[in-house]
Image: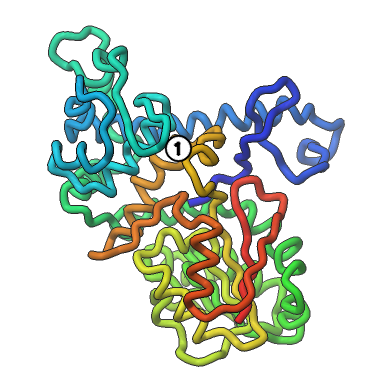
Amino acid sequence: MSVEGVRGDLGGDGTPGLAGPAGAGVRPPGGGRPIDEDKVRRIALEVWRFKQGEMVSLMIHLGDRLGLYRAMVGAGPVDAAELAAQTDLAERWVREWLLSQAAAGLVRSNDGEHFELPPEAVPVLADDRTSLWFAAGAFHGYSASPEVVDALAEAFRSGVGLSYDQLGPAAAHQVERMLGPWTRLALVAEIIPALKGIGERLRSGGRVADVGCGTGLAVFALADAFPASFVEGFDPSAHAIDVAERRLAETELTNVTFHRLPAAALPDEATFDLVMTLDCLHDMPRPEEAARAIRAAIRPDGAWLIKEIKAGETWAENSKNPVLAMMYATSVATCMSSALSEPGGAGLGTLGMTRSRAEQMCSSAGFSSFEVHEFPDPANVYFEVRP
């Protein structure tokens, strides 16, 4: 999951704002006088707050439906294990839900480990019998279908999440809409040129694997920009690959192919000049297995480009994110759910692939070089990994 354009910087009036590329002027489509960039930031943040509200509304629904709020009444500070035991729910799911609630300011937490429902929140979130202030019952689970919401509620009990296909065809479209602008605007123009030697390789004719390609936006962008290269997309989602193949049939590209396969099914030989995992490692049930498969499939002089959500190593670092509640709620609804969609899944969640975890994972898989790129993408970080 990625949020295009979100950053916890301050706007010109001191309010949390959003930023585009550093130093870039903001002009309306078709030219004209520059737009007030501080106002753009404020409006953009307000728009993303609406999205955050959508995701937090789902978490409120689940908290009410599963009895999580009621279990916290009068309990004082509790940790995820205690609340999970009291509600007979899976601890990992309860923990991510608690983090989302703390980020939203609906429960209190000073350390990201212990959480308390304030007494003032009880009549609003937990007391559906005597309080005229009770509001949690008004939330029915954002824009997900009733079937998906039911399945998410069951995942709290079983501990096993939903794959992206189980979220329905709309999930692939939603991911594409969030990731599309940056993929189209920056991948070829800014990111590929920053990877030493890769642009030249692709211009002369290389081989690329986009692992977790979704509907193929990055595949099409690279195939069009580098017609001498062959670009392959890998994704286990039938919905996403069906869309990608339909779009491929509408193009004249002859240097693209798609595979409905997970990362572990990459060719077991050093054949790719560039492998990409764009905002998807944290969604995988077994990212370490993916890293090992990529190591086997990449050429000795090739590169692995990892795009991940900017995530702090601590609760204090992450708490600076102005849409942190949306991040954790989205994790419960999609990212962590996907990462737990197989028994024994890693369950990293949206903010789970920190820099330290990514670097350790790459080292364990046999990579020797790990470089961080700071592109003007306020929501994501990019790692260039070499054998």
Residue 337 is left or right of residue 46, and the answer is left
Residue name at image x 20 percent, y 25 percent = 75
Seen in the picture, residue 132 relative to 49 is either above or below; the reply is above
Seen in the picture, residue 222 relative to 25 is either above or below; the reply is below
Residue 123 seen: yes
Q: Residues within 10 Å of mark 1 (few under 14, many from 20)?
A: many
Q: Residue furthest bottom?
A: 269
Quadrant into which the C terminus falls: bottom right
Looking at the image, how many numbered discs can be counted on the residues?
1
Residue name at image x 86 percent, y 31 percent = 33
Residue name at image x 20 percent, y 22 percent = 73
Q: Residue furthest right?
A: 33
Quadrant in which residue 27 is drawn? top right
Quadrant in which residue 115 is drawn? top left
Q: Looking at numbered disc 1 in the image, what kind of residue is underneath it?
A: Met
Query: Residue 112 versus residue 157: which sits nearer the camera?
Result: 112
**Residue 190 percent coordinates (x, y):** 75, 61
Residue name at image x 27 percent, y 10 percent = 133
**Residue 70 percent coordinates (x, y):** 18, 25
Residue 364 is left or right of residue 148, and the answer is right
Residue 252 seen: no
Label 1 secondary element: helix
**Residue 211 percent coordinates (x, y):** 49, 72
Query: Residue 156 versus residue 356: which sits nearer the camera?
Result: 356
**Residue 88 percent coordinates (x, y):** 13, 42
Q: Which residue is mark 1?
A: 326
